[in-house]
Image (cartoon, rainbow, N blue to C red):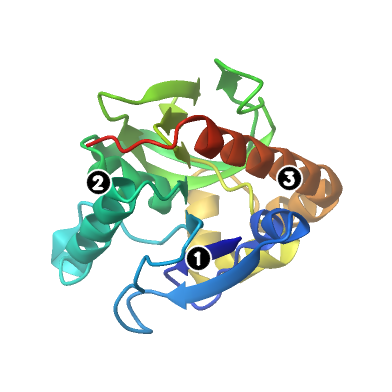
Amino acid sequence: MRVLVIKHHEIDDAGFIGAAFEARGAVLEIHLFPDAGPLPPLDGIDHIVVLGAAWSVYDTATIGHWIGDEIEWLKAADAAGIPVLGICFGAQALTAALGGRVEPAPRPEIGWTTIGTLDPDLVEAGPWLEFHSDQFIIPPQARLLAASDVGAQAFAAGVHLAVQFHPEVDGAQVRRWLASGGAEEAELSGQDPAELAAITEAMEPEAAVRADRLVAHALRIAGDRQVSLK
């Protein structure tokens, strides 16, 4: 199984999600977009993981020179029946590709959060790490799987799974985010950055297990619905 991971920042990685795919025999191929060049061809790809980003999908003044390419590429993946697991910004880009909307959330959501699940067999309540200030309004053909008081947290659409939270992160990843500007965001949302990092490190064993189960569910969704949404 070839799994293509799209990341948007050098400091990011697929973490627990990548490890869960590898535990099932997957070979991960990592592409940094847009800095490493155009998105790769879809030929021979079995699954796609799109990670988060510091920007907003709708911020065309900042990322307008490449976000359209990513959305069109995701549309092509859907048309080809290639399952996508979208995480945070990746989920928002998938939302836009499938006809949904992305807009500012009522408030930023940062920290470990227990969400309300509508289908615990696909997305469990968590807790999951949140680190975002935007929300997705799910595509019309999608099925809402989880939500919080801020907004939608997960949906399934055809072979795809989108989650607003970050199932992939460990303590090292959170520390990289905090050191790269995230500490101020965390403080503005009422979080103590040092405490957030320490909690994340303490949560690693159970977070890894939850991420593994989420990948199992993503593969189940992909196997259940090998059809295009178009």
Query: For mark 1, does the 10 Å Cα neighbourhood hold few (<14), some (14 to 19), or many (20 or more) residues?
Result: many
**Three-letter amino acid code of the residue under disc 2:** Ala
Residue in view at x 73 percent, y 60 percent: 25
Q: Is residue 136 above or below residue 87?
A: above
| Residue 37: numbered disc | none
Among the two numbered marks 3 and 1 on one chain, the one whose residue lies closer to the N terminus: 1
Q: Element type at marker 1? A: strand
Residue in view at x 45 percent, y 66 percent: 44
In 3D space, how far apart are the residues under numbered discs 2 and 3 (Cα atoms)? 26 Å
Assign the C terminus to one quadrant of the image: top left
Percent position of residue 73, x then y:
27, 60
Query: For mark 3, does the 10 Å Cα neighbourhood hold few (<14), some (14 to 19), or many (20 or more) residues?
Result: many
Q: Is residue 64 above or below residue 107?
A: below
**Three-letter amino acid code of the residue under disc 1:** Leu
Judging by the rendered image, the residue that carries numbered circle 2 is 97
Judging by the rendered image, the residue that carries numbered circle 3 is 212
Evaluate whether residue 139 shows in this view: yes
User: In this image, 198 relative to 229: left or right?
Assistant: right
- Of residues 70 and 65, which is closer to you in this image? 70
Residue in view at x 74 percent, y 51 percent: 200
- Of residues 198 and 33, which is closer to you in this image? 33
Query: For mark 2, does the 10 Å Cα neighbourhood hold few (<14), some (14 to 19), or many (20 or more) residues?
Result: many
Judging by the rendered image, the residue that carries numbered circle 1 is 4
In 3D space, how far apart are the residues under numbered discs 2 and 1 (Cα atoms)? 18 Å
Percent position of residue 53, x then y:
41, 61
